[in-house]
Image (cartoon, rainbow, N blue to C red):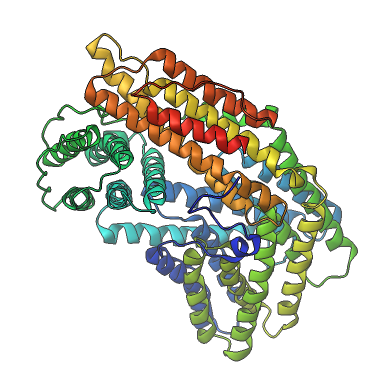
């Protein structure tokens, strides 16, 4: 398969070190800098020379550091939930580890048990996975460091104080902005802005990337609105209004896909109208934009005019007007509410039937056990750092193990050099605290770009904090590098190279590609089904079509992310991943063709021939089966139906890509 334009580089070294492009979260940077630097700085000023108070200040700063890493912004309720869950998990882990301090057998048992729990938590949710990782980290920290606090159960309290301090700063920041729903407003507005960029890109090579940006924006907006949907938020009129505006973006996105398929560039007025809508959503005081004159020259433009008028009427507070895709209820976000029982059942299903999950947990446990054995058997100065490195790098749901191991090693070496420079060149006290604040502020910016870059910032933060407690111990810096490299070596030698799944990425990716092809076939069936004869049932059918489209694009987006992570692996793994890229692009084009054809049929009052739709569905299903069986697609005569011509062309292209 040859790579299409816009495909990612197949150079695994380039993918390994290349930082992502992402906006800098300056608000989180300021919060993190203040939260981490102030507690230890205050302890230095009020009680200079008192090691017990300084140790207490360091623990409070570590608590603030934990919760700062967990705070990724977003809805206020979700931020508070993440901070509290992470802080409590870390405190429990520190207590469990402290109880095993000094007993090698107890330490191994507690750390391995924590590794099992941490690995299993990865199938529950992203928040549970992050909290479980902090639990594992601080089990290791508690079992390896004596902070000098007695009785032993006192150690977690400063961590919780640091978390409360960071949570208080977060509340103050939200209050200062004066807009409790600002993250949600920005997320919904970004969907409209992304669609405007897609319309600008019509007729240019950037159109595919622009459409993917729309998918990303919609995924993030829906995720954020779902996270904010609590019993209170469901009755909040501002939240309900934002959900209605997000749902109103769905027909705009579908119409934009159709216009892009038609290929004729639009006048700047239409994209600019979308940007004006975005500004009005983000700032409720801004006047609603003036809607352009309806353009019904093509089905795509007719659908776009209709959906723009709908969005404009919602901003003005008017009743919804007729559109191709009716909006959903104001209290819905197009995704079902997931109860705690359903999450538990889903997690249990993953554990019972998910062989990959148990293999990932097993790899983590084996690596942690080997790291603990190295820590016990060899006379290392601070061996707990080896286990820490293994725990962070080997977390099974955090992406490429190889990439994280290499990035962690390189980032730590560079970070330790920064930390050593601060410790050696700056006097102990406020100069080091200022440096600590600057480095801590860089963490939220770095983590969005590259894991190795994040390691470069967080490592000197930890080195400075521990150096303040162990003043003058320059061996700490040297041992930090050595222990990190030993931990990364354990990950690569024990947790990466020997496992068969490491060397069968093509088989793993093929299963995901086949699943996505099946999803596209299902979307085709839903999108081009004959409309219900009862007019009252048609809005529900249209909403089902939109929901299926969003689900399919989300699966495609997840598949792209998986392939891009795998591209950071060395050959032949990265080569196998790059080989699937053309098929992913082809499936995206099939999905675009289905969307535009469905809109064209709705605008033109045409009904797709269901026999022809069935043939296309069979062709996509056979494509999925061929991917799973590692065989060429069967010979199927694709329909020549005029309405379905674009879909037939793209399905044929997708099958040809696989055959080649």
296 vs 158, nearest the viewer: 296
Residue 82 placement (x, y as % from top left)? 48, 49
Please determine whether, in this image, residue 646 is positioned above or below residue 10: above
Is the N terminus in the top left, top right, bottom left or bottom right quadrant? top right
| Count of number-bearing discs | 0
Is 386 left or right of 68, judged from the image as shown? right
Is the C terminus in the top left, top right, bottom left or bottom right quadrant? top right
Answer yes or no: is residue 51 visible: no
Residue at 64%, 40% in the rendered image: 509
Residue at 33%, 26% in the rendered image: 598
Which residue is situated farthest in the right direction here?
377
641 vs 658, nearest the viewer: 641
564 vs 600, nearest the viewer: 600
Please determine whether, in this image, residue 563 is positioned above or below residue 318: below
Dividing the picture into quarters, in which one does residue 480 lie? Answer: bottom right
Dividing the picture into quarters, in which one does residue 223 lie? Answer: top left
Residue 409 placement (x, y as % from top left)? 69, 67
Residue 331 placement (x, y as % from top left)? 29, 30
Residue at 77%, 52% in the rendered image: 496
656 vs 422, nearest the viewer: 656
Residue at 36%, 44% in the rendered image: 221
Answer yes or no: is residue 327 visible: yes
Dividing the picture into quarters, in which one does residue 56 lie? Answer: bottom right
Is 303 left or right of 61, judged from the image as shown? left
Which residue is situated farthest in the top direction here?
533
Residue 574 placement (x, y as % from top left)? 66, 52
């Amino acid at each position: 398969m040859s790579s299409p334009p816009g495909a990612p580089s197949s150079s695994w070294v380039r993918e390994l070190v290349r930082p992502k492009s992402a906006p800098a979260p300056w608000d989180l940077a300021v919060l993190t800098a203040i939260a981490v630097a102030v507690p230890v700085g205050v302890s230095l000023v009020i009680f200079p020379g008192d090691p017990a108070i300084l140790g207490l200040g360091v623990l409070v700063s570590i608590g603030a550091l934990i919760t700062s890493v967990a705070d990724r912004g977003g809805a206020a309720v979700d931020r508070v939930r993440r901070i509290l869950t992470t802080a409590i998990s870390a405190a429990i882990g520190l207590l469990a580890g402290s109880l095993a301090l000094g007993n090698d057998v107890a330490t191994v048992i507690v750390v391995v048990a924590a590794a099992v729990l941490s690995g299993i938590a990865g199938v529950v949710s992203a928040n549970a996975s992050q909290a479980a990782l902090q639990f594992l980290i601080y089990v290791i920290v508690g079992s390896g460091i004596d902070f000098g606090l007695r009785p032993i159960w006192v150690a977690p309290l400063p961590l919780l104080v640091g978390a409360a301090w960071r949570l208080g700063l977060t509340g103050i920041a939200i209050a200062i902005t004066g807009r409790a729903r600002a993250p949600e407003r920005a997320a919904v507005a970004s969907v409209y802005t992304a669609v405007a960029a897609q319309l600008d890109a019509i007729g240019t090579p950037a159109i595919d990337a622009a459409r993917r940006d729309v998918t990303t924006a919609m995924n993030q907006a829906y995720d954020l609105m779902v996270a904010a949907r609590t019993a209170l938020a469901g009755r909040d009129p501002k939240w309900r209004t934002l959900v209605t505006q997000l749902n109103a973006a769905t027909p705009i996105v579908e119409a934009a896909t159709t216009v892009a398929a038609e290929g004729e560039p639009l006048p700047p007025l239409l994209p600019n109208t979308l940007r004006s809508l975005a500004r009005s959503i983000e700032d409720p005081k801004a006047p609603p934009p003036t809607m352009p004159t309806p353009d019904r020259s093509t089905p795509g433009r007719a659908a776009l005019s209709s959906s723009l008028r709908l969005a404009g009427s919602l901003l003005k507070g008017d009743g919804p007007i007729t559109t191709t895709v009716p909006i959903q209820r104001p209290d819905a976000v197009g995704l079902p509410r997931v109860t705690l029982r359903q999450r538990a059942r889903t997690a249990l299903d993953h554990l019972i039937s998910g062989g990959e999950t148990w293999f990932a947990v097993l790899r983590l446990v084996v690596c942690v056990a080997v790291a603990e054995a190295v820590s016990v058997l060899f006379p290392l100065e601070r061996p707990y750092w080896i286990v820490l490195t293994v725990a962070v790098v080997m977390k099974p749901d955090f992406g490429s193990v190889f990439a994280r191991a290499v990035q962690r090693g390189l980032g730590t070496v560079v970070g330790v050099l920064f930390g050593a420079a601060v410790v050696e060149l700056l006097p102990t006290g406020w100069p080091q605290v200022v440096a600590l604040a600057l480095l801590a502020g860089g963490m939220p910016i770095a983590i969005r770009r590259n894991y190795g870059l994040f390691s470069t910032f967080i490592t000197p933060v930890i080195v400075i904090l521990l150096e303040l407690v162990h003043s003058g111990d320059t061996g700490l810096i040297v041992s930090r590098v050595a222990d990190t490299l030993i931990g990364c070596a354990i990950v690569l030698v024990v947790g990466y190279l020997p496992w068969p799944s490491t060397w069968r990425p093509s088989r793993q990716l093929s299963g995901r590609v086949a699943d996505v092809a099946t999803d596209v076939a299902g979307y085709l069936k839903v999108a081009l089904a004959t409309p219900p004869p009862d007019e009252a049932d048609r809005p529900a059918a249209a909403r089902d079509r939109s929901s299926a489209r969003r689900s399919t694009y989300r699966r495609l987006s997840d598949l792209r992310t998986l392939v891009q992570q795998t591209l950071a692996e060395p050959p032949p793994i990265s080569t196998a991943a790059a080989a699937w890229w053309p098929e992913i692009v082809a499936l995206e084009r099939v999905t675009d063709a289905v969307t535009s054809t469905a809109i064209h049929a709705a605008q033109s009052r045409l009904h797709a021939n269901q026999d022809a739709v069935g043939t296309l569905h069979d062709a996509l299903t056979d494509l999925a089966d061929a991917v799973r069986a590692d065989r060429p697609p069967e010979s199927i005569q694709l329909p020549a139906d005029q309405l379905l011509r674009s879909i037939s062309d793209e399905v044929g292209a997708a099958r040809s890509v696989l055959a080649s």
